[in-house]
Image: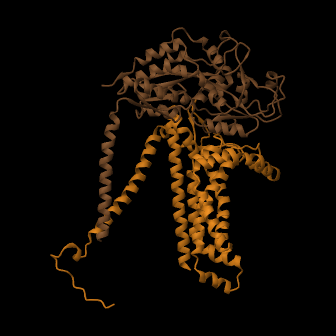
Chain colours: A orange, B brown
Amino acid sequence: MTSVPHEPPAPSAPLERRGIRLGDVLFQGVSVAAALVATGLLVLIAYKVIAQAWPAIKHFGLQFLWREAWNPVTEQFGALTFIYGTVVTAAIALLLATPLSLAIALFLTEMAPRKLAAPIATMVELLAAIPSVVLGLWGILVFGPWVAQHLEPWLQSSLGFLPIFSGDPSQAGILPAALILTIMIVPITSAICRELFVRTPRDLMDGAMALGSTRWEAIRRVMFAYAAPGISAAVLLGLGRAFGEAIAVTQVVGGFDSINRSLFHPGDTLASRIASQYQGATSELQVGSILYLAAILMVISLMTNLAAQFIVRRFEKARRAV
Amino acid sequence: MKRALTLMLALASMVAIAVVAGRAEAAPAQKTDTSITGTGATFPFPLISKWIPAVGSAYGINVTYSPTGSGAGIAGVTARTVDFGASDAPLSADQLAACKGCVVIPWALSATSVPYNLPGLNGRLRLDGPTLANIYLGKITKWNDAAVKALNPKLNLPDTKITPVYRSDGSGTTYNFTEYLSSVSAEFKGKVGNNTSVSWPTGIGARGSSGVAGVVSKTEGALSYVDVAYSIKNQFQFATIKNRAGKFATPGLRGINAALSQLPKKVTQLSQLKIVDPPKSAGPLAYPIVTFTYVIVPTGSQKAAELRKFIYWAVTQGQKFGPALLFQPLPQPVQAFAFREIKKIQAST
């Protein structure tokens, strides 16, 4: 196509011909407004949470973070049990969900026959569509009892010397909660990993195989390395979900307010305690303490998010250096 | 560019219409004078559901009630987002202060049962206050413990672990149960205390009556506390509890009625409505874990007239719906107290 020499329009010409398009301006305005609203909302929420938590922050100070108590009668509150519960359930869920998701994604992209891959992929994603409440109910009625009657005794008989598998099996506890969280994380993480694996440049894989590596070596050294930033982002996305999950966890975690060395024993997490106690709080200090827990949860989520961005950026830098 | 502009125009006009329509909707909804809204405890919900159509046809007042929990009921009426709140537990001092001029009126009366899961037991379980307290303190851990055996000499109690289950969310039933246990066991009172939500030394927490029911039904050897109507509706086996007269009482209407005999002839304060752990004089039928359930109303309200009519009807004619649902009709001293409190609800200026 031949290009016609373009002359700058006269200053008195209408806006469009001057190069300023009304649509662009409006769109830019709306986008900026939306971004500002989102940021403003974050600041507003953080402010409101801290403002309402202030009576507890003033009363307990930073000691709240390593106090193991939750007694509405004597008004002694502390977050340690719940920080422990949140970190442990999320860690276990992550430890179990990551290899599982990678395996599912690998199976679906590399090993499954085409016709099988699509329905299995859909079903894994449908797992994410199950509402948390339903998962929690299933946890209490089906999964919890199964864990208490089969999984926990088996763990105790084979690895019972470990303190984390000591104590009586219980259908509500840290372990069932962590397993439910695993079920919630796997669909998200495996879906993202699958997308990443599909996008690995074919010629990189072909090159590796041409140089004599086995299938598994090619996958490990090329595909995983290429997808590493994305995988870490996916894992951290799952972690975010694990931290914030309240309803399903509160059904199966057992609502206990001190730390026990056994994973079988009931415990509680930050989100779960907030969800179960907020509406029934009988004193201003209790309300403040619950919101203090909310503030702590927000800080943990924020730190996780920042860590995620940092890791992704590190991987990106490393990859660009290649 | 034209398409972008038209799209944006369409969006803007939709937003404008929504805003205008929203404003127009909101205004009339507030002015409907014959409708009142309430929220709160799930415990009286079956009874309130029976009241709603009856009050509607008697006075033309449209009542809506959503069972979201005692805590939500208290919070709702404190924030004045609803016209009345319902709670199984009386308000704490802090809550009363926060409510800024609310009256608390008892409007129904029922009992807390103790369901258990012991398949294959050849009879009904009998328990007493101190034993229950020790179970929940973690001092009695097996069903064939000497203390439990002593109360049930004829039963084949198994060597199963006792799993006490409690409510992890704030609950009026917890308040009633802990009030009873604190009354019969000084150790329980010191270690745990009495509140809608306490720090339990042992056991499993479950969310809501349905959560508790789920855990108890799936865990052999589990024991819990739940209101008697719920137990019966879900066909749980619940224990008989020993009263001060030395007899094992059931949480039926006669048991509840007998427990009321300790009420003074004239009730002037809410604190006089403590009916757990009735004394020996209450008789052999008295069930020890009985509770009132309350409606909380602001003393200055735009719906004062409707609220007065509704609550007056509820504590008089509404009580006849109670027995079928295991709510004992209010005794006369409590009704009189309710009438006096209802008078305090005045129209706000």
Is any atom of residue A10 visible in this view? yes
Q: Position of residue B9 (x, y in %)?
A: 29, 61
- Which is nearer the eye, B26 or A139? B26
| Image quadrant in which the N terminus of chain B is located | bottom left
Total marks in image:
0
- Which is nearer the eye, A100 or B31? B31
Toward the bottom, the furthest residue is: A2
Q: Position of residue B113 (x, y in %)?
A: 66, 26
Image quadrant in which you'd find residue A92: bottom right
Image quadrant in which you'd find residue A233: bottom right
Q: Position of residue A195 (x, y in %)?
A: 57, 70
| Image quadrant in which the C terminus of chain B is located | top left
**Does residue B348 appear left or right of residue B334 in this picture?**
left
Q: Is residue A117 above or below residue A130?
A: below
Q: Position of residue A230 (x, y in %)?
A: 56, 68
Q: Is residue B174 above or below residue A297?
A: above
Residue at 45% across / 19% down in the picture? B312
Image quadrant in which you'd find residue A116: bottom right
Toward the left, the furthest residue is: A12
- Which is nearer the eye, A32 or B336? B336
- Which is nearer the eye, A145 or B123? B123
Residue at 32% across / 64% down in the picture? B7
Is any atom of residue B277 visible in this view? no
**Does residue B121 appear left or right of residue B176 in this picture?**
right
Residue at 66% across / 19% down in the picture? B288
Q: Is residue B319 above or below residue A257?
A: above
